[in-house]
Image (cartoon, rainbow, N blue to C red):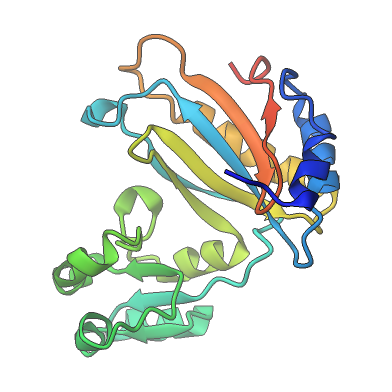
Amino acid sequence: MKHGKKYVEASKLVDRATMYESADAIALVKKTATAKFDETVEVHIRTGCDGRHAEQQIRGAVVLPNGTGKTVRVLVFAKGEKANEAEAAGADFVGGEELIPKIQNEGWFEFDVVVATPDMMGVVGRLGKVLGPKGLMPNPKAGTVTMDVTKAVNDIKAGKIEYRLDKANIIHCPVGKASFTEEQLQQNYDALMGAIVKAKPSALKGQYLKSVTLTTTMGPGVRVSTAKLV
C-alpha cells in the first residue's frame, strides 16, 4: 500500500521497534496528526481471546471523562412516559413502531447510537438484519437496553463508547480528537484501558493484551507498552 508524503514524514517520527509509555505515545500521535481536519485518535487492542467461544467474548461500554469530541446522535425506542423522559434527556429522535419502515425501507440512518426500553425490543428485533451489521443493535451489556433512558442518553452524550471484539479478536475504539490536550487523551485512554483490563474473561488462558497501538485517522501506528496494564 502506497502512503502519501505526509504519512511518510509522520512515520519518520515513530520508532517501530519501540514500545512507548502511554504518555509518550499520546504526545507522538498528536505530532503525527497532520491532516487538514481534526483527526480522531484511536486505540487498537489485539487480544489473546478467541471470540468464537462465548465465554471469551468481550463487550461493554465506558464513559470517557472528556468525551470523544464528536456529537453523537441518539435514537431511542420508547413509548409513553419513557418516550417523554428520552426527549427531556436530549435524545435526537424518539419513536416506536412507526420508525421501522423508515429505517427498513427508506434506509434512514441519521443516528449513531440506538437505545431501547426492554418492552420495545420486540419491535427493534425486527430491525436486527439492518442494525446488527452496522453495530447499532441495542444490547443490555452496553447499557443500551434499559428502563433508565435518561441515564443512557446522558451517558452517551457525555462520551460513552462501546467496545467489543471484532472477528480478528481486536478491539477498536476512539479516545478523542487530535485537538484534545495530552492530559485529556491520557484520561480517556486510562478510562478505556481500565475497563478493558477489568473485562478480561476468566476463561482465558495465556496472554490477554497482545498489543496496543495508538493512531490518528491518517497517521501511523504507535505501539504502547502494556507492562503497567497487566
Compared to 224, does 8 lie above or below?
below
Q: Is residue 145 left or right of residue 34?
A: left
Report x, y in % for residue 208: 46, 19
Q: Is residue 222 left or right of residue 34?
A: left
Report x, y in % for residue 2: 63, 46
Q: Residue at x 16, y 66 (%)?
A: 125
Compared to 71, does 84 lie above or below?
below
Q: Is residue 31 left or right of residue 215?
A: right
* Closer to the camera in the image, 23 or 78: 23
Compared to 123, does 194 lie above or below?
above
* Closer to the camera in the image, 147 or 28: 28
Compared to 149, does 212 lie above or below?
above
Name the quadrant of the C terminus.
Answer: top right
Residue 130 visible in the shown view: yes
Report x, y in % for residue 202: 35, 18
Q: Quadrant of residue 47?
A: top left
Q: In this view, does 152 lie to the left or right of 106?
A: right
